[in-house]
Image (tube, grey):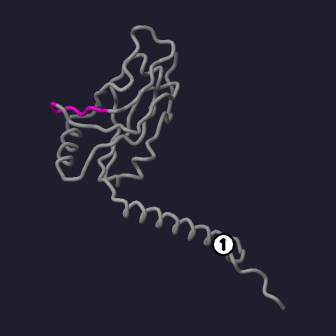
Amino acid sequence: MSRDVGRKLIAANKKARHDYTVLKTYEAGIVLAGTEVKSLREGRVSLVDAFAQESDGELLLHGLHIAEYGYGTWTNHQPRRTRKLLLHRVEIARILEKLRDPGVTLVPLSMYFSNGWAKVEIALARGRRSYDKRQVLAERDANREIARELGRRLKGRRPAGEGRRPG
């Protein structure tokens, strides 16, 4: 059986991008059991409550839910078990150094297959307050409106709200 080429998204954590300001992202491998990989290929995973922590110089992913494989036997995995992340020692040292800063945490943003290997995109992130979230949403809406107006002007159309003049 040939291996998949390219990147195939399994799951994304949209809430993490809303709740946190992403400082830096990393791609990490993940240690999985056979039935977990089969469940991932079916897309049965949730990153919503997941977070990463350091333990004995290693990074572990907690709260990641991979549903049990439907055709698994007694060898099936536990859905919310702690899983080890695979990174280079230098990267782990850099991450741990940044995690010492107050308010910085490590959250998974997405999970995907890269050339057949399961990968997790993790991010060093700082939590947003509710007013920061509102400000980001307002800024996004304003940018969307500006882009829409520029598109209208480039196409030679009148701006919204300006109809034909009576005369």
Number of marks in picture: 1
Seen from this angle, which residue lies furthest bottom? Answer: 167
The three-letter code of the residue at mark 1 reads Leu
What is the x, y in percent for residue 99? 21, 46
Magenta span includes 57 = yes
Q: How would you rate the neighbour count of disc 1 (Cα within 10 Å): few for under 14, some for 14-19, many for 20 or more?
A: few
Of 159 and 6, nearer the camera is 159
Instruction: Using residue 115 as the reference point, say whether residue 82 is left or right of it.
Output: left
Seen from this angle, which residue lies furthest right? Answer: 167
Q: Is residue 1 above or below residue 93?
A: above
Seen at 34% across and 33% down, the residue is 63
Residue 153 quadrant:
bottom right
What is the x, y in percent for residue 88? 24, 34
Q: Secondary structure at mark 1?
A: helix
* Residue position for label 1: 154
Residue 154 quadrant:
bottom right
Magenta span includes 94 = no
What is the x, y in percent for residue 138? 47, 66
Q: Is residue 92 above or below residue 31?
A: below
Seen at 28% across and 28% down, the residue is 84
What is the x, y in percent for residue 72? 46, 12
Is most of the magenta stretch helix, strand or loop?
A: strand
Of 114 and 31, nearer the camera is 31
Q: Is residue 120 above or below residue 97?
A: above
Chain part drawn in magenta = 56-62
Quarter of the image with the C terminus is: bottom right
Of 146 and 128, nearer the camera is 128
Seen at 33% across and 59% down, the residue is 129
